[in-house]
C-alpha cells in the first residue's frame, strides 16, 4: 500500500465495566473519528453504541521502531581508562549496516561495521579488526588501556579462525558524554533505536582502569526484563522489546535442555533488529464500559477520509452481574500467536492451494506489516532464528473480525469466533465472554459461575495455568463444549512483568513452523519445558478426549455417525439430525471436518470414559500433512480422520468435542438450518440446563477406541 495506514491497538484484549482500556492510534493525516460498535464480520451488521469516545480525536502518524536493546536508567559513566569485555555471537555480521554492541552512542562504543568487522569508536579514534566476525560463532571482545594506548582485541572460540587486534593513542575523556546514553545492542537517536544488533551477547563488563563500573549477569532471572548488575553500583539494566533470554552462552556444554537445568550455561541474551513487543505509541483515548454494557465482542471503529480500521476487544461480565449460563472462552493466546503471520507466503504450494498468485491474495495492509517488520510467532526473524514472542501492544493487522485467511479462503481465529458469537446472538443464547488472558490470571474461579463453557474454533496455545483451570472445571463437574481443532497443543507462557507478551518455544517435533535451537526448549518466562503439551505427558486427548490428528487444505469432509450416536443415552445430541452423515456447508473449506482436525487416541491419553459418536475420513491426501504429534509436518503415524467424542466423567463433568476448525463455520449455513447448528444447539441446551444433559448410563457400556 502507498503511505502509512490508519491503524490502532489496545492495551489489552479485554476490559470489565468500570475499568479503563487505552487505545493507541496512528493517524497519518492527523485527526480521526472513532466510535464504539458491537462487532460483526460484515460492516453492514455492526451495531453502533453511543459512548464517550465517539467523535473526532487528535492524531498523528506514529513510527514502528523495531529492535531489542538494553538501557541503564542510572547510567554508566564513560571510563577514562576503558576496560571493557563481552562475548558476542553475531547472526548477520555482514549486514551492510552498523550494528551496535555496547557503548555511549556513535562516538564511544563497540560496533560491527557493514562487512562484519569489529570496530571501536572512541572519541574520534577508530580501531577496526581486519577480519569479519564469524557467523553464529562466539567471540570474546576486549577493550583495554595500556599506558597511553587503547587496545581492541577479539578472540574467536572456534579453532582455525584468526584472532584480531589493533591499538591507537588513548584520547582524552569527553566529560560531556551523558552516562544515560549507554546502551547494549543498539544506540538511541531521536528517541528511537538504531544500529540494532542481531545475535547473542554474553558477560558484558565495564571498568575504568582497575575500578569496576558494571558487570551484568545475563543468566539471572531470565523471565524478567530487568538485568542485574553485580558491580559495586548496582547499575541494573532494563530490556526493551523483549529480546530472548534463557538462551545458551559461550560455555554451554550440551548437557542441558534449558536454563532452569543449568543457569550458568545460559548467560546470554539474543537480540533481534526486528523485535517488537510494545510499539510505544501514546494513548489516543481510553474507554470505560458502563455497568450495563453486556459482556460481548466490541470494536473501536476508526475513520480518516477513505481509510478505516476496526480494533477489536471484549467486555467481560461485571463483577456483580448475574452470570449467563454459558461462557465463551476466547482463545486470545492463539490470536496473538497468529497475529501478523506470513510464514505461509513462501510455501511452494501456496498458489495451488489458494487458487491464485500470492500478490493477488495478500492484502495491502499485510504488505505494509511486512515492510514495517511486524512478524508473528510463526515467522523467522531477519537473522533466521524463530520468533518466540508475540505481543498485543502493536498493530495486529490480521486480527480483525472481517479478515479472511487467503490460504484457507475463509475466516480463521478472531473472524471465525465472531461468526460463532453472531450465531449465538441469533439463537438468543445468553453468554458471557472470558479470554485466555483472564483465565490464565484468575484460574478456575473464572469458570465456576457457568453451567457450561464453550471453546473457540482454534484454541491451540494454552498456558499451564489455563490448562489447569479447564481441567479443574471439568473435574469438578463442569460441562465443556469443545468446538475447535488443533486444541491445547503448544505450551504457552506469559511474562509476569510483561503480561502483554506471550512466549512459545517450539521444541523439535510436531507441526512446528521452526525448531528451537539446541538446548533452548525451556520457556524463559517460567523455566518449564516448551514445545508440545504431548511431550509433557499432557496431550489434549486426556482432557478433551481428542487431540491433533491431521491438517488438510482440501475440501472439508462430513462426519458419519457411529452406532453409539443412536444409543438413547446420546441420541438427544442428534435430535433433528436424521441422516447418517453430519454435513453442512462450511465457510472454511466447505465441510464440517476441515483444515485442522482432532481425533481420539488411547495411546496419547484418551480416557476410557470417552465415546466415539461420529467419524470423518477421506481427507484430500495431496494436500494433507499428518500432524499426529509424532513427526515434523509430514509422516505416516496416526490416522487421517477426525472423531466427534463425548466424555462422562465420574465426578459429573461432561465434555462434548466436535474437534474441527471448520465446524463453527457451518453454523450459519442455510440460516442455521443444518446438522452442525442443530447438534451444537442441542448440546448447548442440554449443558446449560441446571440438571445437565440426559445422558443416562447405557446397558451395553460405552464404546471407546
Image (tube, helix red, strand yellow):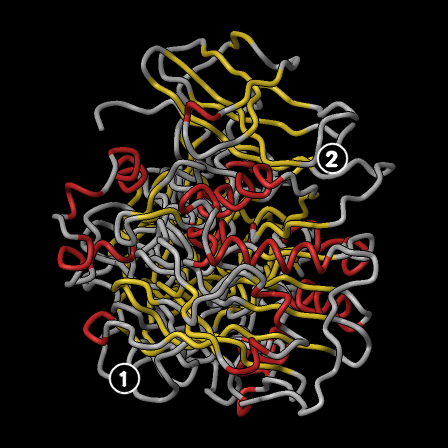
Mark sitting on residue 327: none
On the image, the x and y values in percent for residue 80 come to 50, 45
Q: Circles 2 and 1: CB distance less than 8 Å?
A: no
| Residue hosting label 1 | 159
The image quadrant where one finds the N terminus is top left
Q: Kindly indicate the quadrant of the structure image that contains residue 165.
A: bottom left
Q: Kindly indicate the quadrant of the structure image that contains residue 7.
A: top left
Kindly report the distance in space between the C-alpha atoms of the residues bearing marks 2 and 1: 60 Å
Compared to 590, does 78 lie above or below? above
On the image, the x and y values in percent for residue 520 come to 48, 74
Answer with left or right where residue 316 lies relative to residue 627.
right
Residue located at (49% from left, 50% from top): 335
455 or 705, which is in the foreground? 705
Circle 2: is it few (<14), some (14-19), or many (20+) Cα within 10 Å?
many
Looking at the rendered structure, the secondary structure element under dot 2 is: loop
| Residue hosting label 2 | 16
19 or 611, which is in the foreground? 611
Residue located at (23% from left, 42% from top): 362
On the image, the x and y values in percent for residue 47 come to 54, 22
On the image, the x and y values in percent for residue 339 come to 42, 47
Please report whichever mark, 2 or 1, sits nearer to the chain's N-terminal start. Answer: 2
319 or 410, which is in the foreground? 410
Answer with left or right where residue 513 lies relative to residue 672.
left
Amino acid at each position: 500500500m502507498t503511505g502509512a495506514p490508519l491503524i490502532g491497538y489496545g492495551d489489552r484484549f479485554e476490559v470489565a465495566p468500570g475499568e479503563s482500556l487505552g487505545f493507541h492510534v496512528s493517524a497519518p493525516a492527523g485527526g480521526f473519528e472513532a466510535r464504539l460498535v458491537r462487532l460483526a464480520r460484515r460492516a453492514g451488521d455492526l451495531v453502533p453504541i453511543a459512548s464517550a469516545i465517539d467523535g473526532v480525536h487528535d492524531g498523528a502518524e506514529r513510527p514502528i521502531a523495531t529492535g531489542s536493546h538494553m538501557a541503564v536508567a542510572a547510567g554508566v559513566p564513560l571510563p577514562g581508562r576503558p576496560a571493557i569485555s563481552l562475548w558476542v555471537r553475531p547472526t548477520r555480521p555482514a549486514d551492510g549496516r552498523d550494528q551496535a554492541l555496547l557503548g555511549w552512542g556513535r562516538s564511544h562504543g563497540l560496533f560491527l561495521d557493514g562487512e562484519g568487522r569489529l570496530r571501536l569508536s572512541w572519541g574520534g579514534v577508530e580501531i577496526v579488526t581486519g577480519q569479519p566476525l564469524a557467523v553464529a560463532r562466539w567471540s570474546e571482545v576486549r577493550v583495554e588501556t595500556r599506558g597511553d594506548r587503547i587496545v581492541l582485541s577479539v578472540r574467536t572460540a572456534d579453532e582455525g579462525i584468526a584472532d584480531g587486534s589493533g591499538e591507537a593513542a588513548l584520547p582524552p575523556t569527553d566529560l560531556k558524554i551523558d552516562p544515560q546514553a549507554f546502551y547494549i545492542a543498539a544506540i538511541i537517536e531521536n528517541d528511537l533505536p538504531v544500529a540494532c544488533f542481531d545475535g547473542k551477547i554474553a558477560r558484558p563488563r565495564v571498568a575504568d582502569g582497575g575500578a569496576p563500573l558494571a558487570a551484568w549477569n545475563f543468566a539471572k532471572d531470565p523471565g524478567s526484563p530487568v538485568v542485574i548488575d553485580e558491580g559495586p553500583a548496582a547499575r541494573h539494566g532494563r530490556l526493551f522489546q523483549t529480546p530472548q533470554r534463557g538462551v545458551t552462552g559461550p560455555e554451554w556444554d550440551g548437557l542441558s535442555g534449558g536454563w532452569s537445568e543449568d543457569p550458568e550455561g545460559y548467560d546470554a541474551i539474543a537480540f533481534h533488529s526486528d523485535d517488537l513487543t510494545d510499539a510505544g505509541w501514546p494513548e489516543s483515548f481510553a474507554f470505560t464500559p458502563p455497568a450495563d454494557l453486556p459482556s460481548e465482542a466490541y470494536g473501536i471503529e476508526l475513520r480518516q477520509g477513505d481509510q478505516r480500521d476496526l480494533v477489536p476487544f471484549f467486555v467481560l461480565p461485571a463483577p456483580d452481574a448475574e452470570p449467563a449460563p454459558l461462557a465463551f472462552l476466547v482463545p486470545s493466546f492463539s490470536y496473538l500467536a497468529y497475529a501478523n503471520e506470513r510464514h505461509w507466503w513462501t510455501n511452494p504450494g501456496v498458489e495451488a492451494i489458494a487458487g491464485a498468485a500470492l500478490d493477488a491474495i495478500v492484502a495491502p495492509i499485510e504488505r505494509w506489516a511486512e515492510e514495517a517488520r511486524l512478524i508473528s510467532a510463526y515467522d523467522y526473524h531477519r537473522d533466521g532464528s524463530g520468533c518466540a514472542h508475540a505481543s498485543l501492544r502493536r498493530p495486529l493487522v490480521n486480527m480483525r473480525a472481517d479478515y479472511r485467511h487467503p490460504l484457507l479462503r475463509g475466516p480463521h481465529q478472531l473472524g471465525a469466533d465472531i461468526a460463532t458469537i453472531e450465531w449465538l446472538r441469533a439463537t438468543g443464547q445468553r453468554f458471557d465472554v472470558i479470554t485466555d488472558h483472564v483465565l490464565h490470571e484468575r484460574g478456575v474461579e473464572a469458570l465456576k459461575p457457568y453451567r457450561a463453557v464453550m471453546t473457540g474454533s482454534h484454541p491451540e496455545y494454552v498456558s499451564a495455568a489455563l490448562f489447569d483451570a479447564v481441567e479443574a472445571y471439568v473435574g469438578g463437574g463442569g460441562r465443556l463444549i469443545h468446538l475447535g481443532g488443533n486444541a491445547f497443543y503448544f505450551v504457552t507462557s506469559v511474562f509476569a512483568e510483561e503480561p502483554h507478551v506471550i512466549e512459545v518455544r517450539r521444541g523439535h517435533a510436531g507441526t512446528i513452523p521452526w525448531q528451537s535451537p539446541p538446548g533452548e526448549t525451556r520457556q524463559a518466562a517460567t523455566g518449564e519445558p516448551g514445545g508440545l503439551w504431548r511431550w509433557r505427558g499432557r496431550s489434549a486427548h486426556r482432557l478433551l478426549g481428542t487431540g491433533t490428528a491431521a491438517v488438510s487444505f482440501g475440501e472439508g469432509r462430513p462426519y458419519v455417525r457411529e452406532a453409539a450416536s443412536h444409543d438413547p443415552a446420546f441420541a438427544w445430541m442428534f435430535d433433528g439430525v436424521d441422516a447418517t452423515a453430519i454435513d453442512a456447508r462450511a465457510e472454511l473449506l466447505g465441510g464440517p471436518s476441515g483444515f485442522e482436525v482432532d481425533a481420539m487416541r488411547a495411546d496419547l491419553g484418551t480416557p476410557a470414559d470417552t465415546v466415539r459418536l461420529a467419524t470423518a475420513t477421506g481427507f484430500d491426501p495431496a494436500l494433507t500433512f499428518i500432524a499426529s504429534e509424532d513427526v515434523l509436518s509430514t509422516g505416516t503415524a496416526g490416522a487421517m480422520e477426525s472423531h466427534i467424542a463425548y466424555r462422562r466423567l465420574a465426578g459429573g463433568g461432561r465434555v462434548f468435542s466436535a474437534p474441527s476448525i471448520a465446524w463453527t463455520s457451518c453454523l450459519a449455513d442455510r440460516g442455521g438450518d443444518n446438522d452442525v447448528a442443530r447438534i451444537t444447539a442441542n448440546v448447548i441446551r442440554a449443558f446449560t440446563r441446571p440438571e445437565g444433559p440426559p445422558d443416562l448410563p447405557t446397558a451395553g457400556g460405552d464404546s471407546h477406541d
